[in-house]
Image (cartoon, rainbow, N blue to C red):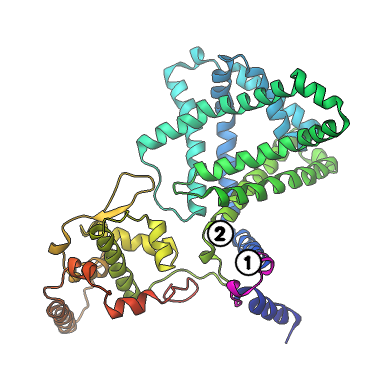
Amino acid sequence: MTKKSRVETVLRKNVWEVELSSLPWWKGWLTRVLRMFYVVIRDLLEGQLTLRAMSLVYTTLLAMVPLLAVSFSVLKGLGVHNQIEPLLLNFLKPMGERGVELTARIIGFVDSVKAGVLGALGLAFLIYTVISLIQKIELACNDTWHVSRSRPLAQKFSDYLSVILIGPVLVFSALGITASVMSTAVVQKMVAIKVFGSLLELATTLVPYLLMIAAFTFVYIFVPNTRVRFHSALVGGVVAGVLWEASGWGFASFVVKSAKYTAIYSGFAVIIMFMIWLYLSWLIVLVGASVAYYHQHPESMTAHRRQLQLSNRMQEKLALLIMFLVGKNYYDNLPELTLEEFAQSFNVPMEALEPIMAALEGYGLLTQTADEPPTYLPARPLDTAGLKDVLDAVRGANEMVDPKPQSESAELAVDQLVDHLDQAMARALQGSTLKDLALSKPPPISLVSQSSQKVDPSSGEG
């Protein structure tokens, strides 16, 4: 056995095959950290995170000046527009002198943007460019959280405007309040005391880190179109904040030693350095989002990633379980469930349930509420919906190809067999409705045995 094989065997036995509940709390915590570290590194090596980061770099280059121009206009009315330049300087601080030069150029572009000169069409394009950046960030976060649906148009309009118009005001208000508190007479007297002075000095040093962590946490809660728990978002924010500061030091060292790049690229060196820093920044944002996702969904952390493919039998099982829970909650006057709550009830990934939910909705068995995130209700009376309807919804979903074999006799024989199976199923389930399923106590034995089986994402059946 090679050294690599021995290491893989040890990791599998001590990290992936161990039952966390049987370990002491510190060993369980360490095992979870190792699992999360492994799956995040695997996501990076597979290239999806890096591709999304590259896409966001391109969008940011197009939208940065319009975004700052809109923020500049909002903050100018409050008389704090001059604070944009120090904030931009802090963001580009790892670039050293090139960051100062680039900040001056960007601020110059922002100052030259005038609504009267742009006209209505130009102003609309400017706002569209800003909104497209936020939309691209949402799509990247949704992809990380395995959310296929985006926000409705009306919600996008309100949420995006909140980020564009209210976000800068809140940021600079927080900074202004902090500065005002630090300048009060009481605080100044406390600073004169050695112990309090040292504590305040430490707090002042930590404020930038805490603000960065708070910003990342806010992004991870607000941007994905799903419900993100604060604790999970905070864990992702802490990881991203630490990576941000560490990468800033590393990038600053890289810039200091990059004289040869200046000689090669000449005047383009500033732009290239800026693009590299943007790429690292977005990559850190996406890594933090992955950490938040895996913290909230530990069932998605598996030793081997394989494409999730459920067998037809498993899809039918899950469809019946979904309708059983929907009907049971309906008749017991219990709260409706979200997609995430269904996934947690069955211990399966959300992306495994999404196509089944869509099939049941398309067949008129389920409907979504207008809540955010949406919950699921019966789309029609359960005493009028048969169990066969559930199976037909899943079996007939996404039928887009009708095979036409060259042999008519083969087609006729197969069609007769399929019809015979459908008729046999209809006879077996005749008279059985979803109401019967929901009110059965206990639920059918077959469903109990199936629901107790965990769906493993790394297996062929999920």
Q: Is residue 88 left or right of residue 134?
A: right
Specify the amino acid type for callout 1: Arg
Is 100 located above or below residue 40 in the figure?
Answer: above
Q: How many marks?
A: 2
Pointer 1 local density, CA inside 10 Å: few below 14, some 14–19, many at least 20: some
Specify the amino acid type for callout 2: Tyr
Is 267 located above or below residue 282 in the figure?
Answer: above
Front in this rendered view, residue 26 or 289: 26
Residue under label 2: 294
Q: Which residues are magenta?
A: 17-29
Q: Is residue 101 left or right of residue 212?
A: right
Q: Position of residue 66 (x, y in %)?
A: 55, 26
| Residue 417, quarter of picture | bottom left
At 40% from the left edge and 32% from the top edge, which residue is drawn?
157
Q: Position of residue 324 (x, y in %)?
A: 27, 66
Q: Position of residue 374 (x, y in %)?
A: 35, 49
Residue under label 1: 35
| Residue 391, quarter of picture | bottom left
Dot 1: element: helix
Q: Are marks 1 and 2 in contact (CB under 8 Å)?
A: yes
Is 56 located above or below residue 104 in the figure?
Answer: below
At 36% from the left edge and 41% from the top edge, which residue is drawn?
152
Front in this rendered view, residue 28 or 316: 28
Front in this rendered view, residue 351 or 32: 32
The mark that comes first in sequence, 1 or 2, is 1
For the stretch drawn in magenta, what is the main secondary structure?
helix
Q: Position of residue 14 (x, y in %)?
A: 67, 76
